[in-house]
Amino acid sequence: MDEQLPKRTRSQATGEFGVAIVAKIILKELGWQFRRTPQEADFGIDGYIDVVTEKGFVTGRSLAIQIKSGPSYLANGSTTAFLYRGEAKHLNYYLNQVQPVVLVIVDTENEEAWWALFEPYETDKTGNQWTIPVKKSSRLALSAKPALDRLAGPSVDYVPHLEEFWLLGERVKDHDMVCIQVGKLEVEKRHVRPFQRIFERLSVSSATARSAVNKVEFLIDGYSEDSRELYQIPEVVAWLDAAVDAVRSLPFFLHTSAISQGLRLICACRGKAELVRPNLVRLTTPRALLDFLDEQFLRLNEFTEQHDLEDLNKEVSMRLSAVIKSMLSGGGG
């Protein structure tokens, strides 16, 4: 009768027992969650350790885990470390994991386990396999919790940031203009990511983008004591160059009325303006500004096509051209 039934091998039983031991340690000693990889989806990761707070909240932080069980994995190594053996095909698989990969060796007889972080430069090649030491002092137990917690990375409360993100989308619907203030520290560090994120927020949907067309103004703050014009300050010019490169949707969103300041400052920097008299500048490299206009037209076409906003393209193009032609004729300051 037995010969007519499927058979579980000894190695399969040992492997399952090892996984059960690890799951128990994670649940009972660490107080975290073990999430097993379904058998059909196991390509080298047996499961995931989900970090849980002391109050029982699941954080979303996790570690990938590969488990090796049985006497054969305890036999190799030295007096201070076991020698974990892995297959070459798993190297790239582990390296491309989003989470850190934890390697675990299990003593199924005594129900103990030891762990090591998969570090490619800690490995040695042995034939068609690779090996990595797993220190006998690194028991998978409560004592390992702080180190594993650090590996999983910090928990971040993103909700306050999202509240600001959501609020921006609502503000543009109810106002004719939204002004962004760029601080001196951001300029000096050439930090354009906060500026870029605002435009990403406005681009999340066609409806939000439509409500914000030509409404975004920006001002650079912190240079009121500097006798130079902003377009004469090298770090301001460098920040603006980086910002223009980073935000491809600028021509669609930038404020383009007769009093717009952000776009005129960009033009003054690109055209290497010099002050002729108060509120009147002359561009020393007007060709560079024309090249900038051509580039912005291409970006505008790309953005409006991508977001199904072609009906606004002509109007935005005309407004953009009017501001730049004003700068070319010396009418901007």
Image (cartoon, rainbow, N blue to C red):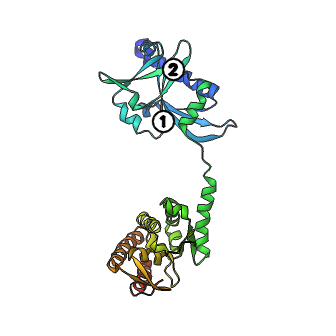
The residue drawn where x is 48% and y is 38% is 99
| Viewport quadrant of the N terminus | top left
Disc number lying in front (2 or 1): 1
- Give the percent coordinates (x, y) of residue 185: 54, 61
Q: Label 1 amino acid?
A: Pro
x and y percentages locating residue 137 in the rendered image = 54, 19
Q: Residue at x 67, y 37 (%)?
A: 56
Within 10 Å of disc 1 (Cα), the crowding (few <14, some 14-19, many 20+) is: many
Residue closer to the observer: 177 or 193: 193
**What residue does disc 1 label?**
100
Q: Position of residue 95 (x, y in %)?
A: 40, 36
Query: Image height check: is 115 above or below 58?
Result: above
Q: Which of 95 and 188 lies nearest the eye of the viewer?
A: 188
Task: Residue type at mark 2: give it.
Answer: Gly
Name the residue rendered at 52%, 70% in the picture.
Answer: 207
Q: Residue furthest left?
A: 127
Q: Which of 327/32 is in front?
A: 327
Residue 38 visible in image: yes
Q: Closer to the N terminus: mark 2 or mark 1?
A: 2
Numbered label attached to residue 18: 2
Image height of 279 relative to 218, above or below:
below
Tag 1 secondary structure: loop
- Asked if residue 8 shows in the view, the reply is no
Position of 88 with respect to 170 (left or right) is left
Q: Quadrant of residue 177?
A: bottom right
Q: Give the left or right position of residue 178, taking residue 13 as reference.
A: right
